[in-house]
Amino acid sequence: MGYSTIYAVSGNDIVYETFDGDAVVLDLASGRYFGFSDSGSCVWEALIAQVPPASLVGRTCGSGQLSAADLDAFIARLNEYGLLSPATGMASAALSPELAQRLAAAREALKIDMHDELADLVMVDPIHDVDEPAGWPAVKQ
């Protein structure tokens, strides 16, 4: 991984929201959604805010420091899932003090959980793909 690489959300099909510090990411193209550990949510937010990975390595993260190896593996999984990709022509940003504080307070290791049990429901087009008498979410056969 290039530690000076700037990353961005891979495309318009990737939507995300942070709820009380926990990031949830939804891939509208596949119907899969992703949850992160508390430290993973902080790193996700930092990366999509154009903070280069080099700015994160060695940062306090719970009772230890964020290692290059852990960060490499986390970013590789984000790329593998198609959530994040290297961005060109974007300027880097500094890690915000608020995000640095949240990262320092994190108690869990970097982790991504992928869920696909609701993919069929997410993929249903409620306007065009429903059986009208049955209603949503009954998909037309």
Image (spheres, rainbow, N blue to C red):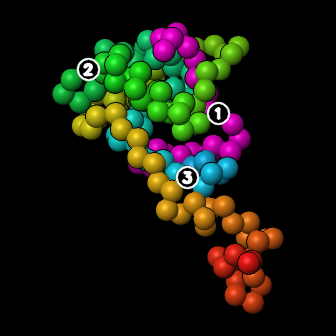
Query: Is residue 69 shown in magenta?
Result: no
- The image's mark for residue 1 is none
Q: Describe the element under mark 3 as helix, strand or loop.
A: loop
Within-10-Å neighbours for mark 3: few <14, some 14–19, many 20+:
many
- The image's mark for residue 65 is 2
- The image's mark for residue 10 is 1
Give above or below for 89 relative to 83: above
| Residue 22 in sight | no
Report the amino acid beneath label 3: Arg
Q: Are marks 3 and 1 in contact (CB under 8 Å)?
A: no
Mark 3 or mark 1: name the one nearer the start of the chain: 1
Alpha-carbon distance for marks 3 and 1?
14 Å
Report the amino acid beneath label 1: Ser
Q: Residue at x 40, y 26 (%)?
A: 73
Residue 118 locus on image (x, y percent): 53, 63
Mark 2 or mark 1: name the one nearer the start of the chain: 1
Within-10-Å neighbours for mark 1: few <14, some 14–19, many 20+:
some
Report the amino acid beneath label 2: Gln
Give the extent of the magenta segment. Answer: 1-25
Specify the quadrant of the image occupied by residue 124: bottom right
Specify the quadrant of the image occupied by residue 98: top left
Q: Which residue is mark 3?
A: 32
Q: Residue at x 41, y 46 (%)?
A: 113
Q: Between 76 and 10, which is closer to the camera in this rendering? A: 76
Most distant residue in the front direction: 141
